Amino acid sequence: MSDELPRPVRVYTPADLESADPTLGMQRALAFELPLLWAGQVVTEPGAVSGWHHHERNESSLYVVRGVLRLEFEGHDGHLDAVVGDFVHVPAWTVHRESNPGGEPSLAVIARVGGGIPTVNVDGPRAVDG
């Protein structure tokens, strides 16, 4: 058994959040980042459409607190909408973008696990040969 004390519990307030991982059309804010965990939030303004991106080897979970979060992603025609109370899972390496078709800013809480680069902006989904 280790004599090392566990890390203390910490509360992160809105004043503690820092702007992070810019992608056109969204405002991400970081609460904290550990070697395998990233936690924060994202706000998307009404009518905004983000740039295409992925989160490298990070599995991402979002919880919608306010508004509508519309998701488009590689390998799926159309979109999925998440609303207040919904959880969203975005698998690692999935090229996607978010938008907000609603009339108020959307707010989602994010937790990512896996480490590596939190956000990689890309030109768009890979073309599918057909």
Image: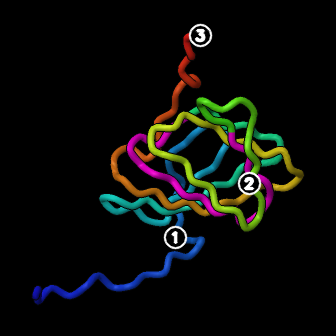
The structure residue drawn at horizontal position 56% and vertical position 76%, both measured from the top left corner, is: 13
Residue 46 lies, in percent from the top left, at 82, 47
Q: Any magenta on residue 49?
A: no
Q: 1 above or below 31?
A: below
Q: Which residue is mark 1?
A: 16
SS assignment at label 2: strand
Task: Decide which of 130, 27 is in the foreground and name it.
Answer: 130
Q: Which residue is mark 3?
A: 130
Q: Any magenta on residue 54?
A: yes
Task: Decide which of 33, 1 is in the foreground and name it.
Answer: 1
User: Can residue 92 be seen in this snapshot?
Assistant: yes
Q: Please name the amino acid that badge 2 sits on.
A: Ala
Q: Which residues are magenta?
A: 53-71
- 3 or 2: tag closer to the N-terminus: 2
* Comparing labels 2 and 1, the label whose residue is closer to the camera: 2
Q: Please name the amino acid that badge 3 sits on.
A: Gly
The structure residue drawn at horizontal position 58% and vertical position 24%, both measured from the top left corner, is: 124
Q: How is the image coloured?
A: rainbow
Q: Residues within 10 Å of mark 3 (few under 14, many from 20)?
A: few
The structure residue drawn at horizontal position 39% and vertical position 84%, both measured from the top left corner, is: 9
What is the chief secondary structure element of the magenta stretch?
Answer: strand
The structure residue drawn at horizontal position 57% and vertical position 71%, both measured from the top left corner, is: 15
Q: Please name the amino acid that badge 1 sits on.
A: Asp
- 1 or 3: tag closer to the N-terminus: 1
Q: Which residue is mark 2?
A: 82
In the rendered picture of this protein, how many numbered marks are placed on residues?
3
> In this image, 97 relative to 68: left or right?
left
Inter-mark Cα distance, 1 to 3: 48 Å
Inter-mark Cα distance, 2 to 1: 27 Å
Q: Residues within 10 Å of mark 2 (few under 14, many from 20)?
A: some
Inter-mark Cα distance, 3 to 2: 30 Å
